[in-house]
Amino acid sequence: MKVEQLLASGKAQEALALAQRLLPKGPADPGLNSLMSLVLLRLGRHEQAEYYALRAQAAEPGSAALMVNLAMVLQARKKQDQALAWLRRAVEAAPSDAKARLALANTLMDMHDAPAAAEHLRVALARGPDAQVAVSYAGALLTMGHIEEVVEFTKGAIRDYPDEAMLVAGLPAALTYLYGAEPSEIAAAHRAYGELMDRLKPAVRFEHTGSRDPVRRLRVGLLSPDLRQHSVSFFIEPFMEHHDRAGIELMVYSGTRDPDRVTQRLRAHASVWRETADLSDLQLAQRVHADSVDVLIELAGHTLGNNLPAMNLKPAPVQVTYCGYPDTTGLRSIDYRIVDSLTDPKTPEVDSHATERLWRLDPCFLCYRPLADAPEPARHGEGPVFGSFNASRKINRGLIALWARLLREVPGSRLVLKSFDFRSKGAAERILAGFEAEGVGAQRLEFLAATPTLAEHLALYSGLDVALDAFPYHGTTTTCEALWMGVPVVTLEGRTHAGRVGVSLLTNAGVPELIARTEDEYVALAAGLARDSARVQHYRRTLRGKMAASAICDPRGFCTRFEGAIRGMWRAYCGVTAG
Protein backbone atom coordinates (compact mmCIF):
# COMPACT_ATOMS: atom_id res chain seq x y z
CA MET A 1 0.00 0.00 0.00
CA LYS A 2 1.28 3.49 -0.88
CA VAL A 3 1.97 6.21 1.66
CA GLU A 4 -1.00 8.25 0.40
CA GLN A 5 -3.35 5.28 0.76
CA LEU A 6 -2.17 4.56 4.29
CA LEU A 7 -2.75 8.20 5.23
CA ALA A 8 -6.21 8.21 3.66
CA SER A 9 -7.16 5.11 5.65
CA GLY A 10 -6.06 6.70 8.92
CA LYS A 11 -2.89 4.62 9.31
CA ALA A 12 -0.49 7.49 9.89
CA GLN A 13 2.11 5.50 11.84
CA GLU A 14 2.29 2.87 9.10
CA ALA A 15 2.53 5.66 6.51
CA LEU A 16 5.45 7.15 8.45
CA ALA A 17 7.27 3.82 8.58
CA LEU A 18 6.90 3.38 4.82
CA ALA A 19 7.98 6.97 4.09
CA GLN A 20 11.06 6.51 6.28
CA ARG A 21 12.04 3.44 4.25
CA LEU A 22 11.51 5.22 0.92
CA LEU A 23 13.14 8.58 1.65
CA PRO A 24 16.79 7.34 1.80
CA LYS A 25 16.39 6.08 -1.76
CA GLY A 26 15.69 9.63 -2.96
CA PRO A 27 16.65 12.11 -0.25
CA ALA A 28 16.36 15.07 -2.62
CA ASP A 29 13.12 13.89 -4.21
CA PRO A 30 10.54 16.69 -3.77
CA GLY A 31 7.60 14.28 -3.82
CA LEU A 32 9.00 12.06 -1.09
CA ASN A 33 9.93 15.02 1.08
CA SER A 34 6.47 16.46 0.64
CA LEU A 35 4.86 13.14 1.55
CA MET A 36 7.02 12.93 4.65
CA SER A 37 5.90 16.43 5.67
CA LEU A 38 2.23 15.49 5.25
CA VAL A 39 2.63 12.33 7.32
CA LEU A 40 4.37 14.24 10.09
CA LEU A 41 1.70 16.92 9.89
CA ARG A 42 -0.99 14.29 10.43
CA LEU A 43 0.92 12.98 13.44
CA GLY A 44 1.14 16.46 14.94
CA ARG A 45 4.93 16.70 14.58
CA HIS A 46 4.73 20.15 13.04
CA GLU A 47 8.34 21.32 13.37
CA GLN A 48 9.65 18.25 11.56
CA ALA A 49 6.88 18.60 8.98
CA GLU A 50 8.05 22.14 8.21
CA TYR A 51 11.63 20.90 7.71
CA TYR A 52 10.59 18.37 5.06
CA ALA A 53 8.11 20.75 3.39
CA LEU A 54 10.87 23.35 3.00
CA ARG A 55 13.19 20.68 1.54
CA ALA A 56 10.53 19.68 -0.96
CA GLN A 57 9.88 23.25 -2.06
CA ALA A 58 13.60 24.02 -2.39
CA ALA A 59 14.04 20.94 -4.59
CA GLU A 60 11.32 22.13 -6.99
CA PRO A 61 10.88 25.87 -6.38
CA GLY A 62 8.38 26.46 -9.20
CA SER A 63 5.82 23.88 -8.02
CA ALA A 64 2.55 25.45 -6.89
CA ALA A 65 1.50 22.17 -5.26
CA LEU A 66 4.59 22.10 -3.06
CA MET A 67 4.04 25.73 -2.08
CA VAL A 68 0.49 24.82 -1.02
CA ASN A 69 1.77 21.89 1.05
CA LEU A 70 4.33 24.14 2.72
CA ALA A 71 1.59 26.67 3.49
CA MET A 72 -0.50 23.95 5.17
CA VAL A 73 2.38 23.09 7.47
CA LEU A 74 3.03 26.75 8.25
CA GLN A 75 -0.61 27.20 9.18
CA ALA A 76 -0.36 24.28 11.59
CA ARG A 77 2.63 26.07 13.15
CA LYS A 78 0.51 29.24 13.53
CA LYS A 79 2.63 31.08 10.96
CA GLN A 80 -0.40 32.47 9.17
CA ASP A 81 1.28 35.41 7.43
CA GLN A 82 4.03 33.19 6.01
CA ALA A 83 1.45 30.68 4.84
CA LEU A 84 -0.53 33.42 3.11
CA ALA A 85 2.59 34.67 1.33
CA TRP A 86 3.40 31.17 -0.01
CA LEU A 87 -0.18 30.71 -1.19
CA ARG A 88 -0.09 34.01 -3.06
CA ARG A 89 3.14 32.84 -4.72
CA ALA A 90 1.46 29.55 -5.63
CA VAL A 91 -1.42 31.36 -7.35
CA GLU A 92 1.02 33.63 -9.18
CA ALA A 93 2.99 30.59 -10.32
CA ALA A 94 -0.12 28.71 -11.50
CA PRO A 95 -3.10 31.06 -11.97
CA SER A 96 -5.30 28.29 -13.35
CA ASP A 97 -4.55 25.86 -10.50
CA ALA A 98 -7.88 25.47 -8.69
CA LYS A 99 -6.28 23.79 -5.66
CA ALA A 100 -3.93 26.72 -5.14
CA ARG A 101 -6.75 29.26 -5.35
CA LEU A 102 -8.89 27.13 -3.07
CA ALA A 103 -6.14 26.95 -0.46
CA LEU A 104 -5.57 30.70 -0.70
CA ALA A 105 -9.30 31.41 -0.41
CA ASN A 106 -9.69 29.17 2.62
CA THR A 107 -6.77 30.90 4.31
CA LEU A 108 -8.27 34.31 3.56
CA MET A 109 -11.50 33.08 5.15
CA ASP A 110 -9.57 32.07 8.25
CA MET A 111 -8.12 35.59 8.27
CA HIS A 112 -11.63 37.09 8.06
CA ASP A 113 -11.45 38.37 4.49
CA ALA A 114 -14.44 36.68 2.90
CA PRO A 115 -14.78 39.14 -0.03
CA ALA A 116 -11.22 38.44 -1.22
CA ALA A 117 -11.76 34.71 -0.72
CA ALA A 118 -14.98 34.82 -2.74
CA GLU A 119 -13.23 36.62 -5.60
CA HIS A 120 -10.54 33.92 -5.86
CA LEU A 121 -13.20 31.23 -5.75
CA ARG A 122 -15.21 32.95 -8.49
CA VAL A 123 -12.08 32.98 -10.68
CA ALA A 124 -11.52 29.28 -10.00
CA LEU A 125 -15.13 28.41 -10.83
CA ALA A 126 -14.97 30.42 -14.05
CA ARG A 127 -12.02 28.30 -15.18
CA GLY A 128 -13.75 24.99 -14.61
CA PRO A 129 -16.15 23.09 -12.34
CA ASP A 130 -14.85 21.92 -8.99
CA ALA A 131 -16.98 20.58 -6.12
CA GLN A 132 -14.62 21.66 -3.33
CA VAL A 133 -14.36 25.18 -4.75
CA ALA A 134 -18.15 25.30 -4.88
CA VAL A 135 -18.38 24.28 -1.20
CA SER A 136 -15.95 27.02 -0.15
CA TYR A 137 -17.68 29.64 -2.32
CA ALA A 138 -21.01 28.87 -0.67
CA GLY A 139 -19.26 29.21 2.69
CA ALA A 140 -17.83 32.61 1.78
CA LEU A 141 -21.24 33.88 0.70
CA LEU A 142 -22.78 32.61 3.93
CA THR A 143 -20.09 34.31 6.03
CA MET A 144 -20.94 37.61 4.36
CA GLY A 145 -24.65 36.94 4.91
CA HIS A 146 -25.70 36.80 1.25
CA ILE A 147 -28.38 34.23 2.05
CA GLU A 148 -30.44 34.46 -1.12
CA GLU A 149 -27.28 34.08 -3.21
CA VAL A 150 -26.09 31.14 -1.09
CA VAL A 151 -29.37 29.30 -1.59
CA GLU A 152 -29.49 29.95 -5.34
CA PHE A 153 -25.84 29.04 -5.89
CA THR A 154 -26.03 25.89 -3.75
CA LYS A 155 -29.11 24.60 -5.55
CA GLY A 156 -27.25 24.92 -8.86
CA ALA A 157 -24.10 23.34 -7.46
CA ILE A 158 -26.08 20.36 -6.17
CA ARG A 159 -27.39 19.77 -9.68
CA ASP A 160 -23.76 19.62 -10.84
CA TYR A 161 -22.49 17.60 -7.86
CA PRO A 162 -25.45 15.63 -6.46
CA ASP A 163 -23.20 13.44 -4.29
CA GLU A 164 -21.20 16.24 -2.66
CA ALA A 165 -22.33 15.87 0.94
CA MET A 166 -21.15 19.29 2.12
CA LEU A 167 -23.20 21.04 -0.55
CA VAL A 168 -26.28 18.94 0.15
CA ALA A 169 -25.87 19.63 3.87
CA GLY A 170 -25.26 23.32 3.24
CA LEU A 171 -28.59 23.92 1.52
CA PRO A 172 -30.90 23.19 4.49
CA ALA A 173 -28.53 25.07 6.81
CA ALA A 174 -28.74 28.13 4.53
CA LEU A 175 -32.51 27.84 4.19
CA THR A 176 -32.93 28.23 7.96
CA TYR A 177 -31.71 31.84 7.53
CA LEU A 178 -33.80 32.65 4.43
CA TYR A 179 -36.58 35.17 4.92
CA GLY A 180 -39.80 33.66 3.59
CA ALA A 181 -38.55 30.08 3.19
CA GLU A 182 -41.35 27.52 3.40
CA PRO A 183 -41.11 24.95 6.21
CA SER A 184 -41.85 22.19 3.72
CA GLU A 185 -38.89 23.24 1.52
CA ILE A 186 -36.56 23.31 4.53
CA ALA A 187 -37.77 19.87 5.60
CA ALA A 188 -37.30 18.45 2.09
CA ALA A 189 -33.73 19.75 1.94
CA HIS A 190 -32.91 18.07 5.25
CA ARG A 191 -34.45 14.80 4.08
CA ALA A 192 -32.40 14.98 0.89
CA TYR A 193 -29.26 15.16 2.99
CA GLY A 194 -30.30 12.10 4.97
CA GLU A 195 -31.05 10.17 1.80
CA LEU A 196 -27.61 11.03 0.40
CA MET A 197 -25.93 9.94 3.62
CA ASP A 198 -27.70 6.60 3.39
CA ARG A 199 -26.50 6.16 -0.20
CA LEU A 200 -22.91 7.08 0.69
CA LYS A 201 -22.79 5.14 3.95
CA PRO A 202 -19.92 2.64 4.09
CA ALA A 203 -20.74 -1.05 4.49
CA VAL A 204 -20.27 -0.98 8.26
CA ARG A 205 -22.88 -2.30 10.64
CA PHE A 206 -22.65 -2.09 14.41
CA GLU A 207 -24.45 -4.73 16.44
CA HIS A 208 -25.87 -3.61 19.77
CA THR A 209 -25.81 -6.58 22.10
CA GLY A 210 -25.86 -4.85 25.49
CA SER A 211 -28.45 -5.60 28.13
CA ARG A 212 -31.89 -4.12 27.50
CA ASP A 213 -32.51 -3.59 31.17
CA PRO A 214 -34.75 -0.49 31.42
CA VAL A 215 -33.51 0.52 34.89
CA ARG A 216 -29.78 -0.19 34.78
CA ARG A 217 -27.07 2.48 34.88
CA LEU A 218 -26.72 3.96 31.40
CA ARG A 219 -23.68 5.05 29.47
CA VAL A 220 -24.72 8.38 27.97
CA GLY A 221 -22.45 9.93 25.37
CA LEU A 222 -22.24 13.63 24.48
CA LEU A 223 -20.71 14.42 21.09
CA SER A 224 -19.73 18.00 20.24
CA PRO A 225 -17.04 20.16 18.60
CA ASP A 226 -18.07 23.12 20.79
CA LEU A 227 -17.19 22.21 24.37
CA ARG A 228 -15.57 25.57 25.11
CA GLN A 229 -16.86 29.12 25.62
CA HIS A 230 -19.66 28.61 23.17
CA SER A 231 -23.45 28.79 23.24
CA VAL A 232 -23.79 25.00 23.26
CA SER A 233 -21.72 24.79 26.45
CA PHE A 234 -23.97 27.31 28.19
CA PHE A 235 -26.97 25.02 27.69
CA ILE A 236 -25.47 21.57 28.17
CA GLU A 237 -23.44 22.34 31.31
CA PRO A 238 -26.45 22.23 33.68
CA PHE A 239 -27.02 18.60 32.70
CA MET A 240 -23.33 17.76 32.86
CA GLU A 241 -22.94 19.33 36.30
CA HIS A 242 -26.09 18.00 37.96
CA HIS A 243 -26.65 14.59 36.33
CA ASP A 244 -27.25 11.57 38.57
CA ARG A 245 -23.90 9.81 38.60
CA ALA A 246 -25.46 6.71 40.13
CA GLY A 247 -27.77 6.33 37.15
CA ILE A 248 -25.61 7.74 34.35
CA GLU A 249 -21.99 7.26 33.34
CA LEU A 250 -21.26 10.35 31.25
CA MET A 251 -19.01 9.72 28.24
CA VAL A 252 -17.90 12.86 26.41
CA TYR A 253 -16.51 12.88 22.86
CA SER A 254 -14.97 16.29 22.35
CA GLY A 255 -14.05 17.47 18.87
CA THR A 256 -13.02 20.86 20.29
CA ARG A 257 -9.87 22.12 18.60
CA ASP A 258 -9.41 25.22 20.75
CA PRO A 259 -10.03 24.16 24.37
CA ASP A 260 -10.23 26.84 27.05
CA ARG A 261 -11.14 27.24 30.71
CA VAL A 262 -14.74 26.25 30.00
CA THR A 263 -13.46 23.04 28.43
CA GLN A 264 -11.56 22.23 31.62
CA ARG A 265 -14.61 22.94 33.75
CA LEU A 266 -16.81 20.70 31.59
CA ARG A 267 -14.19 17.96 31.62
CA ALA A 268 -14.48 17.71 35.40
CA HIS A 269 -18.16 16.70 35.05
CA ALA A 270 -17.48 13.69 32.79
CA SER A 271 -16.85 10.10 33.80
CA VAL A 272 -14.83 9.61 30.60
CA TRP A 273 -13.54 12.35 28.28
CA ARG A 274 -12.21 11.45 24.85
CA GLU A 275 -10.49 13.84 22.41
CA THR A 276 -11.89 13.07 18.97
CA ALA A 277 -11.01 16.07 16.78
CA ASP A 278 -8.49 14.08 14.72
CA LEU A 279 -10.62 10.96 14.27
CA SER A 280 -12.40 10.19 11.03
CA ASP A 281 -16.15 9.68 11.26
CA LEU A 282 -15.66 5.93 10.97
CA GLN A 283 -13.00 5.94 13.69
CA LEU A 284 -15.25 8.04 15.92
CA ALA A 285 -18.16 5.65 15.41
CA GLN A 286 -15.90 2.69 16.19
CA ARG A 287 -14.74 4.41 19.39
CA VAL A 288 -18.30 5.10 20.54
CA HIS A 289 -19.37 1.53 19.81
CA ALA A 290 -16.31 0.07 21.56
CA ASP A 291 -17.25 2.16 24.62
CA SER A 292 -20.70 0.51 24.66
CA VAL A 293 -22.55 3.82 24.76
CA ASP A 294 -26.28 3.28 25.30
CA VAL A 295 -27.61 6.74 24.44
CA LEU A 296 -25.55 9.06 22.21
CA ILE A 297 -26.53 12.75 22.11
CA GLU A 298 -24.99 14.95 19.41
CA LEU A 299 -24.95 18.70 19.98
CA ALA A 300 -24.03 20.20 16.61
CA GLY A 301 -26.59 19.30 13.94
CA HIS A 302 -25.54 20.89 10.66
CA THR A 303 -23.10 23.35 12.22
CA LEU A 304 -19.35 23.55 11.70
CA GLY A 305 -17.34 20.55 12.86
CA ASN A 306 -20.32 18.22 13.19
CA ASN A 307 -20.08 14.43 13.07
CA LEU A 308 -23.41 13.59 11.46
CA PRO A 309 -21.78 10.98 9.17
CA ALA A 310 -20.59 9.17 12.31
CA MET A 311 -24.08 9.32 13.78
CA ASN A 312 -25.43 7.88 10.54
CA LEU A 313 -23.39 4.72 11.16
CA LYS A 314 -25.56 4.15 14.27
CA PRO A 315 -22.76 3.40 16.77
CA ALA A 316 -25.20 3.57 19.71
CA PRO A 317 -28.60 1.88 20.01
CA VAL A 318 -30.39 5.13 20.95
CA GLN A 319 -29.31 8.36 19.24
CA VAL A 320 -30.45 11.89 19.92
CA THR A 321 -29.86 15.41 18.58
CA TYR A 322 -30.15 18.42 20.85
CA CYS A 323 -29.55 22.14 21.15
CA GLY A 324 -26.82 23.00 18.63
CA TYR A 325 -28.97 23.29 15.49
CA PRO A 326 -32.56 24.56 15.16
CA ASP A 327 -34.00 21.89 12.87
CA THR A 328 -34.08 18.23 11.97
CA THR A 329 -30.83 16.57 10.91
CA GLY A 330 -32.54 14.62 8.14
CA LEU A 331 -30.94 11.38 9.37
CA ARG A 332 -33.17 8.39 10.03
CA SER A 333 -30.39 6.94 12.20
CA ILE A 334 -31.07 9.60 14.85
CA ASP A 335 -34.05 8.48 16.87
CA TYR A 336 -35.04 11.60 18.80
CA ARG A 337 -34.76 15.38 18.71
CA ILE A 338 -35.30 17.25 21.98
CA VAL A 339 -37.58 20.32 21.66
CA ASP A 340 -40.59 21.67 23.56
CA SER A 341 -44.26 22.27 22.82
CA LEU A 342 -43.73 25.97 22.13
CA THR A 343 -40.83 25.59 19.69
CA ASP A 344 -42.50 22.62 18.02
CA PRO A 345 -46.26 22.49 18.62
CA LYS A 346 -47.66 18.96 18.49
CA THR A 347 -49.30 18.96 15.06
CA PRO A 348 -49.10 16.44 12.19
CA GLU A 349 -47.32 19.03 10.01
CA VAL A 350 -44.62 19.83 12.57
CA ASP A 351 -44.01 16.16 13.36
CA SER A 352 -43.82 15.25 9.68
CA HIS A 353 -41.05 17.78 9.03
CA ALA A 354 -38.64 15.96 11.36
CA THR A 355 -36.97 12.68 10.48
CA GLU A 356 -36.46 12.12 14.22
CA ARG A 357 -39.24 11.60 16.74
CA LEU A 358 -39.75 14.89 18.59
CA TRP A 359 -39.36 14.60 22.36
CA ARG A 360 -41.00 17.63 23.93
CA LEU A 361 -39.15 18.59 27.11
CA ASP A 362 -41.73 20.96 28.58
CA PRO A 363 -41.99 23.65 29.76
CA CYS A 364 -38.69 24.63 28.07
CA PHE A 365 -36.13 22.52 26.25
CA LEU A 366 -33.29 24.84 27.33
CA CYS A 367 -31.56 25.70 30.57
CA TYR A 368 -29.39 28.81 30.57
CA ARG A 369 -26.33 29.14 32.79
CA PRO A 370 -25.77 32.88 33.43
CA LEU A 371 -22.26 34.18 33.87
CA ALA A 372 -21.47 34.13 37.59
CA ASP A 373 -19.94 37.62 37.57
CA ALA A 374 -22.32 39.20 35.07
CA PRO A 375 -22.68 42.97 35.53
CA GLU A 376 -25.82 44.25 37.22
CA PRO A 377 -28.54 45.54 34.86
CA ALA A 378 -28.07 49.26 34.27
CA ARG A 379 -28.67 51.93 31.64
CA HIS A 380 -25.96 54.29 30.45
CA GLY A 381 -26.32 56.81 27.65
CA GLU A 382 -29.26 58.36 25.85
CA GLY A 383 -32.09 56.57 24.07
CA PRO A 384 -34.02 55.37 22.34
CA VAL A 385 -31.55 52.66 21.30
CA PHE A 386 -32.49 49.36 19.69
CA GLY A 387 -29.99 46.53 19.50
CA SER A 388 -29.41 43.03 18.21
CA PHE A 389 -26.35 40.97 19.08
CA ASN A 390 -27.23 38.08 16.80
CA ALA A 391 -24.91 36.55 14.19
CA SER A 392 -24.80 38.83 11.16
CA ARG A 393 -25.98 36.13 8.75
CA LYS A 394 -29.33 36.17 10.56
CA ILE A 395 -29.79 39.77 9.41
CA ASN A 396 -31.31 39.17 5.98
CA ARG A 397 -32.89 41.51 3.46
CA GLY A 398 -36.40 41.11 4.84
CA LEU A 399 -35.27 41.79 8.39
CA ILE A 400 -33.28 44.87 7.32
CA ALA A 401 -36.43 46.24 5.68
CA LEU A 402 -38.40 45.60 8.88
CA TRP A 403 -35.80 47.21 11.14
CA ALA A 404 -35.47 50.19 8.78
CA ARG A 405 -39.22 50.65 9.03
CA LEU A 406 -38.92 50.62 12.84
CA LEU A 407 -36.15 53.25 12.79
CA ARG A 408 -38.29 55.47 10.58
CA GLU A 409 -41.20 54.96 13.00
CA VAL A 410 -39.11 56.21 15.95
CA PRO A 411 -37.30 59.41 14.88
CA GLY A 412 -33.95 59.91 16.56
CA SER A 413 -33.57 56.23 17.44
CA ARG A 414 -30.42 54.23 16.72
CA LEU A 415 -29.65 50.56 16.14
CA VAL A 416 -26.60 48.84 17.63
CA LEU A 417 -25.55 45.58 15.97
CA LYS A 418 -22.92 43.26 17.43
CA SER A 419 -21.60 40.08 15.87
CA PHE A 420 -18.34 38.15 15.84
CA ASP A 421 -18.77 38.24 12.04
CA PHE A 422 -18.07 41.98 12.01
CA ARG A 423 -14.38 41.26 12.43
CA SER A 424 -14.68 39.79 8.91
CA LYS A 425 -14.75 42.02 5.86
CA GLY A 426 -18.04 42.10 3.99
CA ALA A 427 -20.59 41.40 6.72
CA ALA A 428 -21.11 44.91 8.08
CA GLU A 429 -20.76 46.42 4.61
CA ARG A 430 -23.63 44.28 3.30
CA ILE A 431 -25.94 45.28 6.16
CA LEU A 432 -25.07 48.96 5.87
CA ALA A 433 -25.81 48.91 2.15
CA GLY A 434 -29.15 47.24 2.87
CA PHE A 435 -30.18 49.95 5.32
CA GLU A 436 -29.06 52.72 2.98
CA ALA A 437 -31.22 51.17 0.26
CA GLU A 438 -34.13 51.48 2.72
CA GLY A 439 -33.37 55.15 3.34
CA VAL A 440 -31.61 54.72 6.71
CA GLY A 441 -28.16 56.28 6.89
CA ALA A 442 -25.00 55.05 8.56
CA GLN A 443 -25.28 57.65 11.32
CA ARG A 444 -28.17 55.68 12.85
CA LEU A 445 -26.25 52.41 12.93
CA GLU A 446 -23.39 51.19 15.11
CA PHE A 447 -21.46 47.98 14.43
CA LEU A 448 -19.59 46.22 17.24
CA ALA A 449 -17.31 43.21 16.87
CA ALA A 450 -16.37 40.61 19.47
CA THR A 451 -15.33 41.73 22.95
CA PRO A 452 -12.38 40.16 24.83
CA THR A 453 -14.55 38.74 27.63
CA LEU A 454 -18.13 37.65 28.16
CA ALA A 455 -18.52 40.12 31.02
CA GLU A 456 -17.59 42.99 28.68
CA HIS A 457 -20.05 41.65 26.13
CA LEU A 458 -22.86 41.62 28.69
CA ALA A 459 -21.97 45.14 29.86
CA LEU A 460 -22.82 46.43 26.37
CA TYR A 461 -26.50 45.75 27.07
CA SER A 462 -26.43 48.82 29.35
CA GLY A 463 -26.44 50.88 26.16
CA LEU A 464 -29.72 49.39 24.85
CA ASP A 465 -33.37 50.08 25.57
CA VAL A 466 -34.96 47.36 23.44
CA ALA A 467 -33.41 44.21 21.95
CA LEU A 468 -34.68 43.06 18.56
CA ASP A 469 -34.80 39.34 17.85
CA ALA A 470 -33.77 38.13 14.40
CA PHE A 471 -36.21 36.43 12.04
CA PRO A 472 -36.78 33.76 10.76
CA TYR A 473 -33.80 32.46 12.78
CA HIS A 474 -34.32 33.61 16.36
CA GLY A 475 -31.59 34.17 18.86
CA THR A 476 -31.10 31.78 21.76
CA THR A 477 -28.07 32.77 23.83
CA THR A 478 -28.52 36.40 22.80
CA THR A 479 -32.13 36.42 24.01
CA CYS A 480 -31.18 34.86 27.35
CA GLU A 481 -28.33 37.34 27.77
CA ALA A 482 -30.52 40.35 27.00
CA LEU A 483 -33.21 39.25 29.45
CA TRP A 484 -30.60 38.55 32.14
CA MET A 485 -29.27 42.08 31.63
CA GLY A 486 -32.77 43.53 31.99
CA VAL A 487 -33.34 44.38 28.33
CA PRO A 488 -36.77 43.45 26.87
CA VAL A 489 -36.55 41.38 23.67
CA VAL A 490 -39.18 41.74 20.96
CA THR A 491 -39.59 38.61 18.85
CA LEU A 492 -41.70 37.67 15.83
CA GLU A 493 -43.35 34.26 16.00
CA GLY A 494 -42.44 31.99 13.10
CA ARG A 495 -43.45 28.63 11.65
CA THR A 496 -40.29 26.63 12.30
CA HIS A 497 -38.30 25.73 15.40
CA ALA A 498 -35.68 28.35 14.45
CA GLY A 499 -38.43 30.98 14.39
CA ARG A 500 -40.10 29.87 17.63
CA VAL A 501 -37.23 29.60 20.14
CA GLY A 502 -37.93 33.19 21.18
CA VAL A 503 -41.57 32.24 21.79
CA SER A 504 -40.47 29.54 24.22
CA LEU A 505 -37.92 31.73 26.00
CA LEU A 506 -40.16 34.78 26.41
CA THR A 507 -43.13 32.69 27.51
CA ASN A 508 -41.08 30.82 30.09
CA ALA A 509 -39.47 34.07 31.28
CA GLY A 510 -42.96 35.39 32.03
CA VAL A 511 -43.05 38.10 29.35
CA PRO A 512 -45.24 36.69 26.55
CA GLU A 513 -46.44 40.24 25.85
CA LEU A 514 -43.14 40.74 23.95
CA ILE A 515 -44.09 38.18 21.28
CA ALA A 516 -45.42 39.63 18.01
CA ARG A 517 -47.55 37.58 15.63
CA THR A 518 -47.21 39.83 12.58
CA GLU A 519 -44.61 42.21 11.20
CA ASP A 520 -46.89 45.17 11.90
CA GLU A 521 -47.22 44.05 15.52
CA TYR A 522 -43.43 43.58 15.78
CA VAL A 523 -42.82 47.20 14.70
CA ALA A 524 -45.61 48.57 16.88
CA LEU A 525 -44.43 46.61 19.92
CA ALA A 526 -40.79 47.69 19.61
CA ALA A 527 -41.69 51.30 18.81
CA GLY A 528 -44.09 51.46 21.74
CA LEU A 529 -41.44 50.19 24.13
CA ALA A 530 -38.88 52.69 22.85
CA ARG A 531 -41.30 55.52 23.59
CA ASP A 532 -42.19 54.24 27.09
CA SER A 533 -39.11 54.78 29.24
CA ALA A 534 -40.98 53.90 32.47
CA ARG A 535 -41.90 50.48 31.09
CA VAL A 536 -38.35 49.90 29.86
CA GLN A 537 -37.02 50.77 33.31
CA HIS A 538 -39.51 48.38 34.88
CA TYR A 539 -38.15 45.59 32.71
CA ARG A 540 -34.61 46.64 33.64
CA ARG A 541 -35.43 46.17 37.31
CA THR A 542 -37.46 42.96 37.06
CA LEU A 543 -36.33 40.79 34.15
CA ARG A 544 -33.33 39.20 35.87
CA GLY A 545 -35.50 38.14 38.79
CA LYS A 546 -38.11 36.69 36.44
CA MET A 547 -35.42 34.76 34.59
CA ALA A 548 -33.84 33.47 37.79
CA ALA A 549 -37.20 32.19 39.04
CA SER A 550 -38.14 30.55 35.73
CA ALA A 551 -37.59 27.07 34.31
CA ILE A 552 -34.94 28.59 32.03
CA CYS A 553 -32.58 29.07 34.99
CA ASP A 554 -33.49 26.00 37.05
CA PRO A 555 -30.58 23.61 36.43
CA ARG A 556 -31.69 20.89 38.85
CA GLY A 557 -35.26 20.87 37.56
CA PHE A 558 -34.01 20.84 33.99
CA CYS A 559 -31.59 18.02 34.74
CA THR A 560 -34.38 15.93 36.25
CA ARG A 561 -36.48 16.41 33.11
CA PHE A 562 -33.54 15.79 30.79
CA GLU A 563 -32.61 12.58 32.58
CA GLY A 564 -36.27 11.57 32.46
CA ALA A 565 -36.20 12.03 28.70
CA ILE A 566 -33.06 9.91 28.37
CA ARG A 567 -34.55 7.19 30.55
CA GLY A 568 -37.81 7.35 28.61
CA MET A 569 -36.00 6.91 25.30
CA TRP A 570 -34.07 3.98 26.73
CA ARG A 571 -37.24 2.37 28.08
CA ALA A 572 -38.81 2.66 24.64
CA TYR A 573 -35.77 0.93 23.14
CA CYS A 574 -36.15 -1.81 25.75
CA GLY A 575 -39.77 -2.24 24.71
CA VAL A 576 -41.26 -0.82 27.88
CA THR A 577 -44.39 1.21 27.21
CA ALA A 578 -45.10 4.45 29.04
CA GLY A 579 -47.10 4.26 32.26
Image: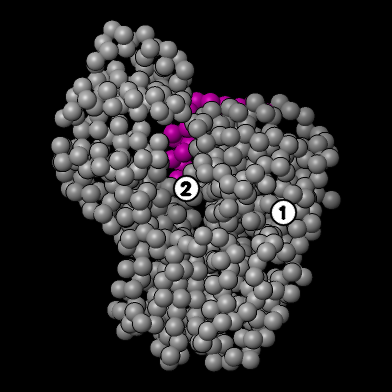
Query: Tag 1, which secondary structure?
Result: helix
Q: Which residue is mark 1?
A: 238
Q: Secondary structure at mark 2?
A: loop
Q: Mark 1 or mark 2, which has the lower sequence index?
A: 1
The amino acid sitting under disc 2 is: Leu
**Which residue range is magenta in the image?**
193-208
Q: Is residue 201 above or below residue 426?
A: above
* Circle 2 residues within 10 Å: few <14, some 14–19, many ≥20: few
Q: Position of residue 106 (x, y in %)?
A: 33, 45
In the figure, is residue 449 to the left or right of 111? right
Res 363 → quadrant? bottom right
Q: Residue at x 81, y 45 (%)?
A: 244
Q: Which mark is residue 304?
A: 2
Residue 82 drawn at (x, y percent): 30, 40
- Give the number of the disc on residue 298: none
Q: Is residue 283 above or below residue 528?
A: above
* Callout 1–callout 2 Cβ contact below 8 Å: no
Residue type at tag 1: Pro
Camera-side residue of 22 and 408: 22
